[in-house]
Image (cartoon, rainbow, N blue to C red):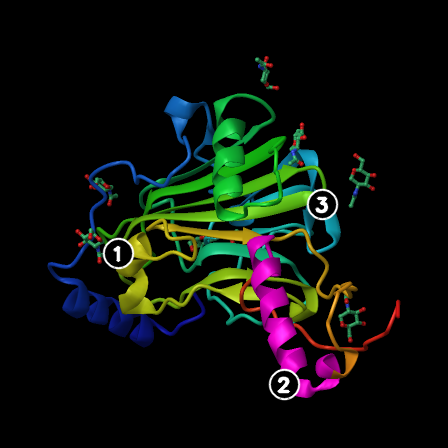
Amino acid sequence: MGLSPVSQYLLMFISVLSLTGRVTKAQTVPVTFYPFGSVAGDTVGIAIEDANSTLVDLWRPFVFFGRTYNKTYVNNNGHLTFNQPLPEYYPKNFPINGNEDIIAPLWTDVDVSLNGSISYQQYSNGSVLTQATRDINQYFPYLNFTATWVLVATWDRVQYLFYSGTEASFQVVLISGGDLSFILMNYGDCAETLNGVQAGYDTVNSTSHSVITVSGSFIPNLVNSSNVNVPGRWAFRVDSAPENIIGVELRVISFSDLTKSENIVNVLEKLQQELVKSGLPSSAKLNFRRIQKTRP
Ligand SMILES: *[C@@H]1O[C@H](CO)[C@@H](O)[C@H](O)[C@H]1NC(C)=O
Ligand SMILES: *[C@@H]1O[C@H](CO)[C@@H](O)[C@H](O)[C@H]1NC(C)=O
Ligand SMILES: *[C@@H]1O[C@H](CO)[C@@H](O)[C@H](O)[C@H]1NC(C)=O
Ligand SMILES: *[C@@H]1O[C@H](CO)[C@@H](O)[C@H](O)[C@H]1NC(C)=O
Ligand SMILES: *[C@@H]1O[C@H](CO)[C@@H](O)[C@H](O)[C@H]1NC(C)=O
Ligand SMILES: *[C@@H]1O[C@H](CO)[C@@H](O)[C@H](O)[C@H]1NC(C)=O
Ligand SMILES: *[C@@H]1O[C@H](CO)[C@@H](O)[C@H](O)[C@H]1NC(C)=O
């Protein structure tokens, strides 16, 4: 951990004080979870050896903000990386402006040698693809999406380092089909922790990133949080390049009306609403570049 014996002792002491009687125990399989664990045929019990990471060769390339990956590392401490394993247990805040793409359902100090397990599985056929297709079309209508590949990685009742008896259950689902790719982050019961936490995703140079706001005592609320109106689930479209320049053809009654800046703002707002329905993150900003008269 790189801490002096005194500070380790202090941390453990704090954990006893703040967590007594508030340890979350997962009672049932979280409702938002895709099938997982040995019953689902997962590769189970990974990520204890080899720098706390497991390399997964992907059956289909996965496009993440314009970069195409054929492998991923499922890292112990609640995240996936693509170019190399990331053993780091202490999260950095997104945006990192670093040189790695990272997908972090819950980046924190997890120790599976203490309790819980991490497992994964890929799918290229069957009911999990049907489930992914249905979910993505529900959250991103108008794309007419069909999933052809899914990877499910699950942290099942894992324990936080220093917090004896704690459990956290969360899952990340990578979904692709055609040129589109998505991630789901699913949360079950997660105990609170005073270890650092970060959730969401970040890209090389942070050209795209998204943060699920968590702090130690907020973690238990993850099970009820969502950006798609499904408690315990977050969904993101992740294929797109950081910036897209688009042209829009509009039929207007008067060209001069459109050159007024307040009208442009109005048009951009309407356009954004439409694009969000097609998968643009609602946090994305549209900037007006140029207007051109094409027909009399
Ligand atoms: C794996 O994680 C455990 C717990 O955080 C840590 O003690 C151990 O040093 C890690 N191993 C490697 C090779 O990083
Ligand atoms: C991934 O595999 C595809 C073909 O399956 C190949 O075209 C591409 O170059 C590979 N990407 C990387 C980063 O290795
Ligand atoms: C792991 O969790 C189970 C179920 O909560 C518990 O019975 C067991 O004592 C835990 N093991 C350790 C090493 O903490
Ligand atoms: C689904 O994919 C698995 C793994 O590639 C394969 O073993 C199985 O036969 C496939 N099932 C069907 C119905 O295609
Ligand atoms: C949606 O996709 C299916 C299969 O890819 C295709 O048959 C259908 O015509 C598409 N529908 C629309 C409205 O684009
Ligand atoms: C990230 O930023 C560095 C420094 O500005 C630049 O050299 C590099 O090309 C950038 N990488 C990407 C993938 O944009
Ligand atoms: C989540 O919502 C359910 C249903 O409203 C509620 O029973 C539960 O206490 C909530 N959990 C947390 C940690 O807020």
Task: Say which amino acid is labelled 2.
Answer: Glu
Name the secondary structure under disc 1.
loop
Mark 2 secondary-structure assignment: helix
- Observer-nearest of 153 and 213: 213
On the image, the x and y values in percent for residue 262 come to: 63, 85
Give the residues in magenta: 257-280
- The residue indicated by pointer 3 is 69
Q: Residues within 10 Å of mark 3 (few under 14, many from 20)?
A: some
Q: Mark 3 or 2, which is nearer the eye?
A: 2
Q: Which residue is drawn at 66% across and 50% down?
A: 82
Q: In which quarter of the image is residue 209?
A: bottom right
Real-space Cα separation, disc 2 to disc 1, in angstroms? 48 Å
Q: 75 or 188: which is nearer to us? A: 188
Residue 102: quarter of image: bottom right
Which of the marked residues, 2 or 1, is nearer the chain's N terminus?
Answer: 1
Which residue is at the far left?
A: 21
| Comparing labels 2 and 1, the label whose residue is closer to the camera | 2
> Could you tell me how far apart the alpha carbons at marks 3 and 2 are, in whole angstroms?
43 Å
| Percent of width and height locating residue 186 | 40, 47
According to the image, label 1 marks what residue? 191
245 relative to 138 in the view: left or right:
right
Q: Does 257 sit above or below residue 91?
A: below
What amino acid is labelled 3 in the image?
Tyr
Q: Position of residue 220 (x, y in %)?
A: 27, 58
Query: Secondary structure under badge 3?
Result: strand
Closer to the chain start, of discs 3 and 2, is: 3
Where is residue 253? Give x, y as percent.
73, 72
How many other residues sit within 10 Å of disc 1, few (<14), some (14-19) or many (≥20)? many
